[in-house]
Image (cartoon, rainbow, N blue to C red):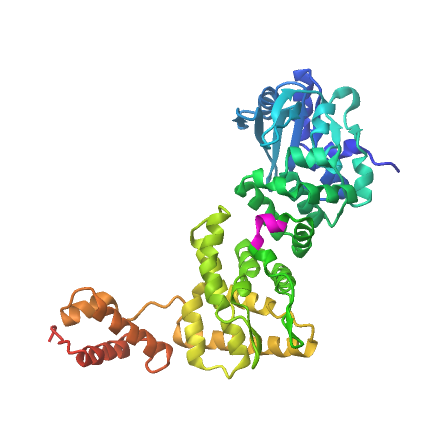
């Protein structure tokens, strides 16, 4: 039985929309992602409506049909409007725009916009699978309008541009990132001519703002298997332009028959492994950056082979510079990524040794509430092809996890607060803020972390008095 496309519009959200289109008296269509996702059987509650007229006027008519609770959000600079339609458990987002024709200057991806027909509007779409439309008009409600055979490309799992790909990508170079993102998200292939065009036009990505590039980059990172997108970016030449530090990881070097692994593909495997365990974008960023300093720390030592000494420390220092350059948030999210990059070897070292309570306490102290994410990252970092080695490492990590729980229950080190404060030290010895206060606080902290005293006030207070006495300080409270 052939698909009844009008069944795609059989939701309460479309009842007032159909009435609004009829009253408005100009042709209107659902276009783009909604049509694509319905044909793919994917759940979606985002609707894009194109009208041969004013999108803002149709949005206002639609909101009036819904009732007084409906609100129109207008974006005058873009000539668009948005209305939220309430549903039982969530809401629909309906966006309206007038059909348009676009042209571009060579030095900008900002289009020169003119009023246009539905055909003009479909011509300006990025890919055939996003250029399909469903009629909202009474005489042919639910008819599929598919001038570029997008439905066939869906069946062939193919990303293809409606027009000449050189024109599509040169006009708006962000579409190159979107092609890779859609291929990654949907498990599709990019048509050969289209991929060749991305490679040819890769340099054009430089005219796109870092924020827009990062938005697409992070959508790729949030796919189920992000390595697919990064490989496509590498093969097309885009990655060299937008993230050269990652490209520097690529390749394995050999001297005297001794080589190191290809850290680019290792990093992609770690990213995939983290993606299997967590939806946390910033943990995925930590996976992507955990070995970012290996190219600058790589050294061949005849006695031991290839080394990457201190790559975790240098990598942590690189994180703020990368975030700044890429116009990413320089806030607690950046500090979280930086912390995980800095600490990512610590649990691995513990998994190779006899695990002492002191080492566990220091790890808990340094990682705080991020200890569980750090363990996910460290387990993801085991990418050996030797199953016995992987099994041994993961078994040791399980022991580390158990020890973390035991030590935390006993010593309460996670997000540790000193049982004796700096104010108490100053009051006891009658001293101002300064180096002596820090010295005593550090002595108490180290004694607790090394297990010399318990994490409690009385023992910490007595140690404070002893340390003060050694420093020649007098207890002015007695």
Magenta extent: 239-244
Residue at 27%, 71% in the rendered image:
441
Q: Image point 66% across, 16% down: which residue?
A: 23
Say if 360 sits above or below 49 in the image.
below
Q: Is residue 92 left or right of residue 190?
A: left
Q: Position of residue 402 (x, y in %)?
A: 52, 76
Q: Main secondary structure of the magenta part?
A: helix
93 sits left or right of 342 in the view: right
> To which quarter of the image does residue 209 belong?
top right
User: What x and y, as percent, mark residue 431?
Assistant: 15, 68
The N terminus lies in which quarter of the figure? Answer: top right
| Residue 221, percent from left and from top | 61, 52
Outermost residue toward the right in this view:
1
Residue 451: image quadrant is bottom left
- Please state the horizontal and vertical placement of residue 239, each as a whole percent of the image: 62, 50
Instruction: Classify residue 374 as left or right of residue 361.
Output: right
């Amino acid at each position: 039985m052939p698909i009844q496309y009008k069944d795609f519009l059989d939701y309460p959200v479309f009842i007032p929309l159909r009435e609004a289109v009829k009253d408005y008296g100009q042709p209107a269509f659902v276009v783009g992602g909604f049509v694509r996702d319905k044909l793919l059987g994917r759940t979606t509650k985002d609707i894009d409506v194109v009208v041969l007229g004013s999108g803002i006027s149709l949005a206002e008519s639609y909101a009036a049909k819904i009732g007084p609770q409906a609100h129109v959000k207008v974006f005058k600079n873009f000539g668009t409007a948005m209305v939220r339609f309430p549903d039982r458990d969530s809401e629909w987002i309906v966006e309206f725009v007038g059909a348009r024709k676009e042209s571009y200057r060579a030095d900008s991806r900002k289009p020169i916009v003119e009023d246009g027909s539905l055909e003009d509007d479909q011509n300006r779409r990025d890919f055939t699978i996003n250029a399909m439309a469903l009629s909202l008009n009474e005489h042919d409600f639910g008819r599929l309008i598919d001038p570029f055979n997008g439905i066939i490309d869906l069946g062939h799992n193919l990303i293809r541009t409606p027009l000449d790909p050189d024109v599509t990508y040169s006009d708006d170079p962000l579409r190159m990132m979107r092609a890779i993102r859609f291929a990654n998200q949907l498990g599709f292939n990019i048509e050969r001519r289209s991929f060749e065009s991305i490679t040819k036009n890769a340099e054009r990505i430089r005219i796109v703002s870092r924020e827009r590039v990062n938005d697409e980059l992070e959508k790729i990172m949030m796919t189920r298997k992000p390595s697919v997108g990064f490989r496509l970016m590498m093969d097309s030449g885009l990655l060299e332009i937008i993230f050269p530090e990652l490209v520097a990881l690529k390749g394995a070097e050999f001297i005297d028959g001794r080589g190191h692994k290809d850290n680019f593909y290792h990093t992609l495997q770690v990213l995939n492994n983290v993606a299997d365990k967590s939806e946390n974008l910033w943990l995925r960023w930590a996976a992507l950056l955990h070995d970012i300093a290996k190219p600058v720390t790589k050294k061949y030592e005849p006695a031991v082979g290839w080394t990457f000494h201190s790559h975790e420390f240098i990598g942590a220092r690189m994180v703020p510079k990368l975030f700044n350059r890429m116009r990413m948030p320089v806030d607690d999210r950046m500090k979280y990524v930086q912390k995980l990059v800095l600490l990512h070897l610590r649990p691995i070292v513990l998994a190779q040794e006899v695990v002492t309570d002191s080492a566990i306490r220091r790890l808990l102290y340094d990682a705080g509430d991020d200890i569980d994410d750090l363990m996910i990252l460290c387990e993801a970092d085991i990418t050996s092809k030797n199953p016995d080695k992987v099994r041994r490492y993961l078994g040791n990590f399980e022991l580390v996890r158990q020890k973390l729980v035991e030590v935390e229950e006993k010593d309460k080190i996670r997000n540790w607060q000193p049982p004796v404060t700096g104010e108490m030290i100053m009051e006891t010895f009658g001293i101002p803020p300064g180096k002596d206060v820090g010295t005593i606080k550090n002595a108490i902290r180290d004694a607790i972390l090394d297990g010399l005293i318990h994490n409690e006030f009385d023992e910490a207070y007595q140690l404070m008095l002893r340390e003060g006495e050694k420093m020649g300080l007098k207890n002015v409270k007695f």
